[in-house]
Structure formats: C-alpha cells, structure tokens
Image: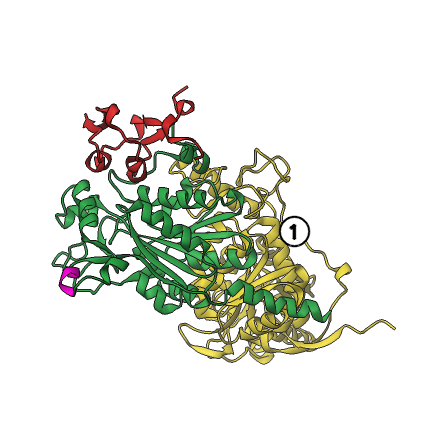
Amino acid sequence: MKKSNVKLMQGNEACVEGAIAAGMRFYAGYPITPSTEIAEVSAQKLPRIGGKFIQMEDEIAGIAAAIGASLAGLKSMTATSGPGFSLKQENIGYAALAEIPIVIVDVQRGGPSTGLPTAPSQGDIMQAKWGTHGDHPVIALSPSSVKETFDLTIRCFNLAEKYRTPVFLMLDEVVGHMREKIEIPDASEIEVIDRLKPAPGDKNYLPYKVEEGQIVPPMAAYGDGFRFHVTGLMHDESGFPSNSSEVAHHLMTRLMKKVEDHLDDIITYEENNIEDAEIVLLSYGGTARSAKSAMKKAREKGLKVGLFRPITIWPFPEKRVKEIAKNVKAIIVAEMNYGQLVLEVERVVKGATEVYHVGKINGEVITPDEILSKVEEVK
Amino acid sequence: MGIQKENLTLKIKKEWCKGCGICVAFCPKNVLALKDEKIEIVDPEKCIKCGLCELRCPDYAIFLGGNEDEEK
Amino acid sequence: MSSQLVKQYYRGNKLPHIWCPGCGHGILMRAVTQAIHNLGLDKDKVCVVSGIGCSSRAPGYMDFNTLHTTHGRALAFATGVKMARPELEVIVVTGDGDAAAIGGNHLIHAARRNINITTIVFNNNIYGMTGGQYSPTTPTGDLGTTAPYGNIDKSFDIAALAAAAGATYTARGTAYHVQQLIKLVENAIQNKGFSLVEAISICPTYYGRKNKKGSVVDMMHWLKDHAVDVKAAQKLPPEKLEGKFLIGEFKNVTEPEYTEEYQKIIDRFQKER
C-alpha cells in the first residue's frame, strides 16, 4: 500500500517542506514572530539531510550568511517578519545587484515598528518592491493556503535560481499559522530548477557575461576553481568594479530586463467568475480567502462578482488587470493595509474603471461581510 | 620564492611608485633615494638583499627579483 | 615587471591599487598574501571576504575567491561561506570602522562561535574612504572631521574585544613590523577556530594630516617607537610602557570549532540511517 503523504501542518511548516523539496540546504535567520516556526523546523530538518542551519546574531547577518552560502553553492533561505524585513533591505539590494539567488520569506505582521507581533497584516507589499534603495528587479509571490505555501516556496527557489535574483515569499500571519491538510507530492513529481553553472575548468569564464541563449550569466561556486570576484559596486562582465556610466547602464538594464522580458514565465494568478463579472474583487494571500467567500455570497444574491487573485504580486499582473478593467464597473481591492497594492491597480487601470479599497490596519482579518458590504455599496 | 638570494637583485617598477619614501627611510644601508618623487637605486653595491624595502613598499614598486622579472 | 609574489597572487591588471601614497594598507595586504604563500595554501581553496572602506578594497586585487560585501557585514557573509564549504580557508579583511562600529555585533558573535575564520583588521584609526571621520579606534583627544574639537569617545582595543568574546587566537602587528606580522597571520590562519589579527596601519592622508603626525616616514617611525612586544613588556616596569602599545601574540588556545561541531550533528543522523 502506498504510504499516505497527507499531513496536517502550518503554513510556516509547509514553507520549510517546500524549501527542502526545492533543494534548500542552508538556512540562516533570527527568531521573529510570526515566522519563527520556519527557523525551528529548518533547524530540526536540515542536519538530518546533510544541510546546515545557523541562528545568526541579527536579521542582517541572517540574510548575509544566506547570500554567502549561496555563493558557496548551496540553495539558501532566510525568513522574517516586518521589522526584520526592514533590516534585511540593504542586503536584498546586494543580492539583486550581485545576482545571488536566495529566498526571503516575510510572514507579515501588523506594523509599523513592533506594532502587532502576533496579528496578520499585508503591510509589507510595497516594502517588498521599494524597500531597498535604487532600482532593482523584484519577484514576490503570495500564497493563500498551506498547500500553496508549499508549492510557491518551491517556485520561489526555482525563480531565484533561474533568474539569479532574491525572491520574496510574502506570507501573512493568517496563512503562516493556519493549519490545513496537504498532500506532499513525491519528489519525482516536483519540478526543481538549479542554477546554470559554467563548464568545469572553463578558462574564459566571466562571472557576469551572458552568452547567447542565456537569461543570466552562469554562476560558479566559491571553491570550484574559478576564483571570481563579487561586489556590490557596479561591475562589468568580469565582476570587477567600474565607474563607467556605460557599464552601469548596461548592468542595470540587464537586471531589469531579465525579469521584464519574462513576465509570462513569472506571473501567475487565479481567476474566478471573471467572464460575466460586473464587479471584480482583487485580493491576495490570506485576505483572498475572505474575498472568495464574499464572491460566493454575492453570487447567491444574484450579483455578478468575480475574483482576481494575483499569486505573483511583483511583477504585478499588469496586462491582465488592464484587460479586466475594460469590462467591469468596478474593481474592489481587499488587503490588510491602508492601501498599498490598490495604488498599483489604480496606476494600471488608469481610470478605465472605478477602483475601491477595503483595508484594515487593526490586526484583524478582513471578513467576507466587510467585502460584501463594499460590493453592495458600489454595485 | 625558492630562489637563491645571491641571484636576486633590486628591481624597481617606477610607474607603481607613489613616492612615499618608506623604503628610503628604512633601508639599513642607504641604498635608495627619491628623485622627482620616484624611487631610485643610488648605491646598488651596498645592498645586502634584506628585502625590507619590498616588505614595506605599500605599492609593490620595489622588490628583489631575478633576471626573469626584467621587463620584456 | 613585478615580483613573483605579485605575479602569483595578485590580479595584475587591477594594480596599482587605489590607496593613497604611503597608506599602510598595501603593506598589510602584502603581508597577508605572503602568509598565504608561506603556508602553501591552494589559491582555489582560499576565500577572501571584506566589507566596505579602504581596507575592504583589498580582495579586489587578490587572486582568490573574493567577496566584497556591504558595510560591516563581511563576517556574516563569511560565516555563510564557511558553513556551506568548511574546506575553504576563509579570510576576512576589514577595517576599524567596518569591524568594530557597524560590524561590531558580527565580530563578537563570530568570535563567540569560534568559527574557523581568520580576520585581519586593517586598523588606521579613522574612516578614510569617507574623508577622515573619527572611528571606534581613534584615540581620545584626536581630531577627525566629525570630531573638530577633539574626540571624546574612548577607543576600542579590538584584539582584546575579540579575545573576550571568545576568539581562540588574537594578535596585533603593525605595518612597520612586517616580518612579525606575516608570522602572526600565518599562526592565525593555522588556528582552527576564530582568529583575529589587528594590523595597525597608517593613514597619512586623513588621520596623519588632521592630527599633525608628520610625514609617512614619521608615522612609520611612530609605530616603530611605540610598539612593544608583549613578551618584552612583561619584563618592563609600568612607566616604560606609558604611551606604548603591545604587539605580538595575545591568545592562542584550542577550543571546539563551530563547523566541526555542526558536522557532528549531521554525522549523528548519517549513522542512524
């Protein structure tokens, strides 16, 4: 009889299961509510499979060690919540510029500051995009269920490896601490992408040179005989710093384009009843569960309401939201903040339809009825 | 570097010299001098090949080397 | 034309380096390289990590696996590298501001773990890259652009700090006493655990000029005249040590090393299988 792989677990636990399935062999972090279980489960599981866990002295060191381990060839992750996410921002920029794949999990809690440590929030959505200084590519995914947390953590690693960039898993306290039954698929059923490596002994290896047909430069590991240089300064194909505006322009454009040119590969979303919808609810993460329930209640009342759930938050599914906006009376954005992703929706639809916001900043989840009453109000 | 000291002589890479004067000041035999803010060997016969100038040159502009180190 | 050492261990096309005339950092970088050579380390298995500042430009010139990170964080990045690949000889090159101010927390915790990383602090008593602000090792009373009326901070003894935090090897050398410094760095690399060598540099351009320390040569003379070997100091009366500083090996002990201890946990599960 096939052993059942159905387990009851928390979102945070599913995140670690997904990470290990994706090949994570190094975790460095600092304890912070409500993400701590990710560190605890990593500490327990990693040495059992030959991986490494280290609890660092602070949040900054957590991401720094993860970047160092990635450069030495291990798939690496760190997890945190709002205050820690703020502290990690400088090194997020480092990983973006130096093109080092890592996964950063942010289990969002009420902020700013220490705020509401045990309460959910979606207040870090804009920080994920704009938190570090300077322009840089951003990939951020947000799951709505425990199973999806497992799947998206794998996807975060795959995207990080494929595009050589830090990737965010934007959990919220609701999904992080919720327990659901999930079936862990067999390893053979999981697609795992590993970083492109230079040919062993390639004497002409330049660590930042993209060859024809490659999305990103192949990445050697320290100790493999390539003796390359990595810096957070602007650098040319050789990896060494340069003050040339031409070099800076070329590097920055390449970094932005590697994500911009592959939106169809990176962006995913879920749609429900969009075809005939007059009002579309746009919601993500834990809040999308309330939105779905609100949609069902509205449909029962005969209201033509649909749901659009971005799974990829950044880059934002701009093209699809633009199309939807042309055919509906209103888009209602529901998110646990004072209005963040709604700004992106407004930017994208450019007045093609009315855009409303249902937000909450008191640490409580948004209920289906709160969304429903907005539907009634604007219908 | 595995080479006998007797076969080594003082070599100067003028273009790297920033004229700080450390080698001149601490040469135990006064072999060196600064000329136009660059290092010069003024008394090569007195050199005892102690290598202190090489150890203390911040710019790697002076060293003990063999014939193979000459500019080609 | 350049020396065999330069040819073998430097990225020739990156030299000459960016440091100012008479900056002690070039001397210190050469000493570190000489120590690596003397130990016969495999270049492919050496990883040199730095943070931000004058000192931290060193790895760019050195032909090893090199990583120029963010300000203060070199030891945290290096910890990740070392954990992932313990077979690498990981050497951190950092400065007084990088190691003891913004990176102070990482320094004490890397020392506490006794992880096998060798840290060489290029201590020039000033923030040079930004133009001469006082650092955690600027002596009390000295001037910096941000201490225009004299520095009222007390300065850190970085070697003592590391020893107190748990480093198993600590030492101090100077840009003047190069032969000794090379030996100290060799010993530090050979120590299986966290090692720190505080290498006293000179900064004629900012610290020296601001504090009227004279020429480059005067500053080298100052190092020569004020450094006292720790062994010799034991035999000297206190009045002879006034205004002097100690150099030499301060601590050299054996304690469990971090990556080996972690490997033991991994091995425990391998045996269970």
Mark 1 falls within which chain? A
Q: Chain letter for red, please.
A: B
Kindly tell me whether residue A212 is visible in this rendering. yes
Image side of residue A34 versus residue A14, left or right: left
| In front of the other: A217 or C96 | C96
Relative to A204, is C200 on the left or the right? left
Residue A327 appears in the picture as rendered: no
Residue A272 placement (x, y as % from top left): 69, 66
Kindly indicate the quadrant of the structure image that contains residue A349.
Answer: bottom right
Quarter that holds the N terminus of chain A: bottom right
**Residue A314 spot, x, y in % from top left:** 55, 57
Please identify which colour was used for chain A in the image.
yellow
Q: Secondary structure at mark 1?
A: loop
Q: Is residue C29 left or right of residue A236?
A: left
Q: Which image quadrant for residue B19?
A: top left
Q: Position of residue A346 (x, y in %)?
A: 50, 59
Extreme residue toward the top, this view: B72
Q: Does the magenta run of residues contain C240?
A: yes
Q: Main secondary structure of the magenta part?
A: helix
A247 and C52: which is toward the camera: C52
Q: Which residues are magenta?
A: C238-242
Which one is nearer the viewer's eye here, C43 or C185?
A: C185
- Which amino acid type is marked by label 1? Asp
Q: Which chain is green?
A: C
Vertical relation: A219 (above or below) B25: below
Residue at 49 percent of width and 47 percent of height: C46
- For mark 1, what is the residue? A194
Q: Is residue A315 magenta?
A: no
Residue at image point 57% right, 48% down: A221
Q: Quadrant of the C terminus of chain A?
A: bottom right
* A326 or C53: nearer the viewer: C53
Q: Residues within 10 Å of mark 1 (few under 14, many from 20)?
A: some
